[in-house]
Amino acid sequence: MTTIVGQSVPRIDAKEKVTGAAQYSGDIVMPGMLHMKLLFADRPHARVLSIDTSAAEALAGVAAVLTAKDVPVNEYGLQINDQPVLCGPGSSKAGGDIIRFVGDQVAIVVAETEQIAAKAVKLIKVEYENLPVITDAEEAIKPGAYALHPEIGVSNICVHDKIRKGDVEAAFAKSDVIVEGEYRVPVQEHAYLQPEAGVAYVDENGLLTIKAAGQWTHADQKQIAHALGLPQDQVRVQYPVIGGAFGGREDMSVQIVLALAAFKLKRPVKTIWSRKESLFGHGKRHAMVIRAKWGATKDGKLTAAETTFIADGGAYMYTSNKVLGNATITQTGPYYIPNFKSDVYGVYTNNVPGAAFRGFGAPQAQFMAEMQMNKLAEKLGLDLVEFRLRNTLKEGDTLDVQTPAVGPISTVQVIEAAARRAGWDKTSQGWKRVENGQSAAGKSPSNLVRGVGLAAGFKNIGFSFGYKDNCWARVEIYGNGSIERVVVYNAAAEVGQGNHTILAQLAAEAIGISFDKVEMITMDTLNMGSAGSASASRLTFMSGNAVKGAAERARAKWDAEERPVVVEYTYFAPETTPFDKETGECLPNFAYAYVAQAAEVEVDTETGQIRVLKIISADDVGKAINPAQVEGQIEGGVVQAIGYVMMENYISRDGYVLTDQFSTYLIPTILDIPVKVESLVVEVPDERGPWGARGLGELPYLPMAPAIMAAVHDATGVWFDEFPLTPERVLRGLGKI
Ligand code: MOS
């Protein structure tokens, strides 16, 4: 029996957020604070020949103008150090004088006011030599294409993952049906509430401190220290309240330049990017072209799949290697496919970098997988639920990496839950939709047609491919006769998902005290071990296990009369292994979670407008630690995915971003979201997670696009292999224009 785990306790950060008391990165004000503005390159590919900062420096109120020559170690990156901090002559690293996308930075100006800094930026004179611009990943991948990172290699291919499982050719030859498709998935902007912002200063003890929202304090600390040529313990990273992240804050933005300026000037320095700077200056979801050929037998069993991915990595690696690794392992969908061949490429271009974004490669890969499933079902004359259920991954079935998925597999449970709720049922001829979604169409004007679709997905929980995933926590118990107060230390980032509330619930449960006795100290590098990132849907599992482990040990010491109790504990996840370079064979992950979603849409065949009427999302979270938060995550994920598939249209041309405002890059508002989102919380525990919890953050995003496509096909008979489903694209697909 649990008492606090499983309850929808109010979020511990709710009050300060709804009252406006919460301090986000941009809200911080310090005495004697200076302001920073950046000179962005605003060109996609060029060599910086010279920079003349004299006029800017001469402007009254300017404290400093810094360029590449002022950066001690002019390189950074979360995975590899391929990005200069500032681009220009005098760089300490080769290639640091090259601009590779419009968001590259040439100089920073620090001044007494924002206005003076902005004015001074305009006084900087830069001489550029433009270089050939490559913005099409399919061009960039060709042998002989202009190499964008010659110091790394002569090819622009920055990632190549291979899957070789079984004999695809032989299996295709024995297949009764084969479906071939080409899918194009777009860039997506994270659109978090607050653009990139932060403050850096040297504190009273001489410690260089950076306060800027991120997803992993210790990873930021390491990169900042590297670029400044400082030992890691001379840099402190602390997160203020974070207005959303979604993967977009995994890679850094303002941190190093702020730290550099504060370290040189020994005064606090602040910057806030404009929305426009945020829209062109920092990574986005990867656009990909995915080609696929899948086969099945006439009794509806998958036989083989062959796929090629070309992902636009943009100018720098960011996390492309890991994102594409995830795309590689999740591209089967939650199905068993005995033979699989795949080549997944990431390619450098002069576009804005491809970055982590909720789902981390899986939404793109599973769009392909589920569209192939939809089309195979159609070709076989099978109901799409029935076809899926004939192929679901079962315990012991191998993934494309030739090892089974670890942990209890719940694909059947989530598909059946979503399907029943959306009007399907098991009949004597297998699963069928017994409530016809089209029935309403007869009563509507003839230009309004309705359809229902369903798709499924799965996602790893935690860091993959041999990284020894770990998370540190400390629990202190105070009191004498009875416990008065518990203090939990864990660096995990609260990016809006509710993690700190979950951790307080888990600590209270493990120690056996009321929730309000728990105090959380979080999001810091000082006196704290690493929690790992708020990513890969991993925190409930990882920081949950760390806090639970520390709390249980602390409770035992309390019971043994130790006063006060202080326990530090690091949770290590089960081991994983990296891809075999030739076959992809590995044990990539230690946990998974499963999801299925149904969508009902109404298509206006005269205008091309589509309304999403209803979404049903069945998510296996293992154990809902806080059911209200689970529903919140599901609703948020659904709305974000609806933006992706229906309307968000990030347009760049020749490396320049055209949709660089929210007036042109449209995200869903209240009028664009479904009339109803039904969350079906499925709980098939994974006993290695705390109280059986798996992870949820990315799950409700994964199969939304293909579920909607199946619904649109049900309504119109047309498959859309590319999105967003703007009215223009819909009308073209319907043959109306
Ligand atoms: Mo996430 S997209 O794993 O930050």
Image (cartoon, helix red, strand yellow):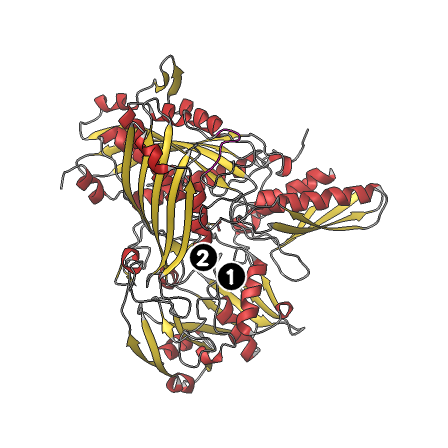
- Disc 2 to disc 1: CB gap under 8 Å: yes
> Residue 25, which numbered label?
1
The residue positioned 19% from the left and 27% from the top of the image is: 445
Q: Give the mark, 2 or 1, whose residue is nearer the N terminus.
A: 1
Of helix, strand and loop, which one carries label 2?
loop
Circle 2 packing at 10 Å, graded few (<14), some (14-19), many (20+), is some
Q: Quadrant of residue 521?
A: bottom right
| Residue 356: % across, % down | 44, 52
Q: Name the residue under label 2.
A: 194
The residue positioned 57% from the left and 64% from the top of the image is: 221
| Residue 629: % across, % down | 53, 39
The residue positioned 51% from the left and 40% from the top of the image is: 696
Amino acid on which the number 2 mark rests in the picture: Gln
**Labels in figure, total:** 2
- Mark 2: C-beta under 8 Å from nearest atom of ligand 1: no
| Residue 197: % across, % down | 47, 63
Q: Is the magenta stretch mostly helix, strand or loop?
A: loop
Q: Is residue 388 above or below residue 190?
A: above
Residue at mark 2 to residue at mark 1: CA–CA distance: 8 Å
Q: Is residue 175 above or below residue 730?
A: above
Residue closer to the observer: 566 or 670: 566
Asked if residue 233 lies in the magenta stretch, the reply is: no
Q: Can residue 487 be seen in this view?
A: yes
The residue positioned 24% from the left and 39% from the top of the image is: 609
| Residue 28: % across, % down | 53, 64
Circle 1 packing at 10 Å, graded few (<14), some (14-19), many (20+), is many
Q: Can residue 514 be seen in this view?
A: no
**Magenta segment range?**
394-399
